[in-house]
Image: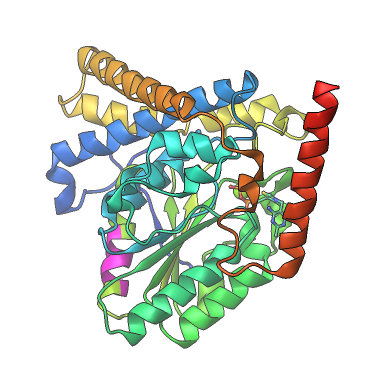
């Protein structure tokens, strides 16, 4: 379907890491580019480890971010400490850069509430990740409304997938963001799949970015495999929102190279050919080739980096395992400040049953 709105689409690097357009000034900073590269590699290695931990029964479910690392890294690199991230479940990269410890992410996916009680003060007022689809978009608008009322120069950033943009919550969030011109940036990770539903049957519009137009604010597309493009457009969007010039929706075109979660088997609904083609576009190889062509990256540096990142992941796994198990009734904690009667009753039942189970064990 033609894109009659002709929204901007930004891409600087082709899949081989060759430049397609003149880079903006900020991209002269190779230290910055190497930092971005490092975080993408760290995320990929963490991801592989998390999947391995699920396969060996040490965590529950995990949502891999493989192939979508650049989106989270751009978010993590650009948000200021006092901005607020309202993430979804595929935001490992951004969360880690905001200060969430990798062991906390493992605790979360291991069903342990301590995984959402972030230890590092740097995480600030960021929200825990959201699993119910698109509800976080409304929470982000609430946060941005508070910022606006207080006259603060802060931004709320919220993320979601392509499928989430079909939800009422998402569209209601866009509406209120546009109506009140809120300092909120919506980052859509369009990874082409919502579990087994492909993007092409998810929505009749040629772009997801144009949903912002209907709500009265700016939307555009960016190559989600190109960290330079992502960084550039997100930098612009955050600055604009911070100056009180209103919300932005960035649709990042990526691909979910892994299964939806470890509970899914994507080979049942998509072809090996499609996935193979998508691997050619992935973001890490692309930046690596660009850095190598600039003479600032080589095999030796790569090996050192991979070694350091693997050690960092290993330390997180050890910290996760050292955390030990929580009592089973901790599932009731942290849900309500004031307990509804029904939940108090359920906890009582839970304790009675647990006691009966214990008795049986000793019979
Ligand atoms: C309100 C709600 N409905 C359904 C689900 C089940 N569900 C979990 S993930 C998902 C698909 C989301 O796809 P997308 O928004 O494209 O994000 P992606 O997982 O691809 O990053 C669905 C339907 C849910 N978690 N919450
Ligand atoms: Mg998706």
Name the residue nearer the viewer: 329 or 31.
329
Colouring mode (rainbow / by chain / secondary structure / one colour): rainbow
Q: Is residue 340 left or right of residue 112?
A: right
- x and y percentages locating residue 109 in the rendered image: 57, 38
Pick the quarter of the image with the C terminus.
Answer: top right
- x and y percentages locating residue 331 in the rendered image: 64, 48
Look at the image and give the residue range highlighted in magenta. 235-241
Q: Is residue 335 left or right of residue 296?
A: right
Residue at 21 percent across and 48 percent down: it is 23
Magenta-drawn stretch contains 236:
yes
- x and y percentages locating residue 120 in the rendered image: 31, 47
Q: Is residue 114 above or below residue 271?
A: below
Pick the quarter of the image with the N terminus.
Answer: bottom right
Q: Is residue 16 visible?
A: no
Residue at 69 percent across and 61 percent down: it is 203
Name the residue nearer the viewer: 245 or 333.
333
Q: Is residue 285 above or below residue 352?
A: above
Magenta-drawn stretch contains 116:
no
Q: Give the main secondary structure, helix, strand or loop, of the magenta stretch.
A: helix
Q: Is residue 6 above or below residue 227?
A: below
Give the image quarter of residue 270: top right
Residue at 36 percent across and 19 percent down: it is 310
Residue at 15 percent across and 26 percent down: it is 296
Name the residue nearer the viewer: 66 or 251.
66
- x and y percentages locating residue 269 in the rendered image: 77, 35
Name the residue nearer the viewer: 40 or 85.
85
Q: Is residue 35 visible?
A: yes
Give the image quarter of residue 64: top right
Q: Is residue 82 above or below residue 96?
A: below
């Amino acid at each position: 379907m033609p894109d009659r709105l002709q929204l901007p689409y930004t891409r600087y690097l082709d899949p081989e890491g060759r430049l397609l357009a003149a880079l903006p000034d900020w991209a002269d900073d190779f230290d910055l580019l190497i930092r971005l590269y490092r975080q993408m590699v760290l995320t990929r290695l963490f991801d592989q480890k998390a999947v391995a931990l699920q396969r060996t029964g040490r965590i529950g479910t995990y949502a891999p971010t493989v192939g979508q690392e650049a989106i989270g890294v751009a978010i993590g690199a650009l948000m200021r400490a006092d901005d607020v991230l309202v993430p979804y479940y595929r935001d490992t990269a951004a969360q880690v850069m905001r200060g969430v410890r990798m062991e906390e992410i493992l605790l979360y996916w291991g069903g342990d509430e301590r995984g959402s009680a972030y230890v590092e003060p740097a995480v600030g007022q960021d929200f825990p990740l959201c699993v119910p689809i698109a509800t976080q978009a409304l929470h982000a608008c609430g946060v941005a409304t508070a910022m606006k009322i207080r006259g603060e120069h802060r931004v709320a950033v919220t993320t979601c997938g392509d499928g989430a943009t079909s939800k009422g919550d998402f569209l209601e969030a866009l509406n209120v963001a546009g109506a009140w011109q809120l300092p909120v940036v919506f980052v859509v990770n369009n990874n082409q799949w919502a579990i087994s539903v492909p993007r092409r049957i998810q929505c009749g519009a040629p772009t997801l970015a144009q949903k912002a137009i209907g709500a009265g604010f700016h939307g555009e597309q960016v190559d989600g495999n190109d960290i330079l493009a992502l960084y550039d457009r997100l930098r612009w969007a955050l600055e604009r929102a911070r100056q009180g010039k209103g919300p932005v929706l960035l649709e990042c075109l990526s691909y979910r190279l892994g299964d939806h979660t470890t509970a899914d088997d994507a080979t049942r609904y998509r072809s090996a050919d499609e996935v193979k083609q998508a691997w050619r576009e992935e973001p890490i190889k692309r930046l690596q080739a660009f850095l190598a062509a600039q003479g600032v990256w080589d095999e030796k540096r790569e090996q050192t980096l991979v070694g350091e990142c693997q050690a960092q992941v290993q330390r997180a796994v050890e910290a996760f395992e050292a955390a030990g198990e929580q009592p089973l009734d901790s599932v009731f904690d942290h849900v309500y400040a004031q307990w509804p009667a029904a939940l108090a009753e359920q906890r009582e039942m839970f304790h009675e049953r647990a006691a009966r189970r214990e008795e049986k064990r000793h019979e």
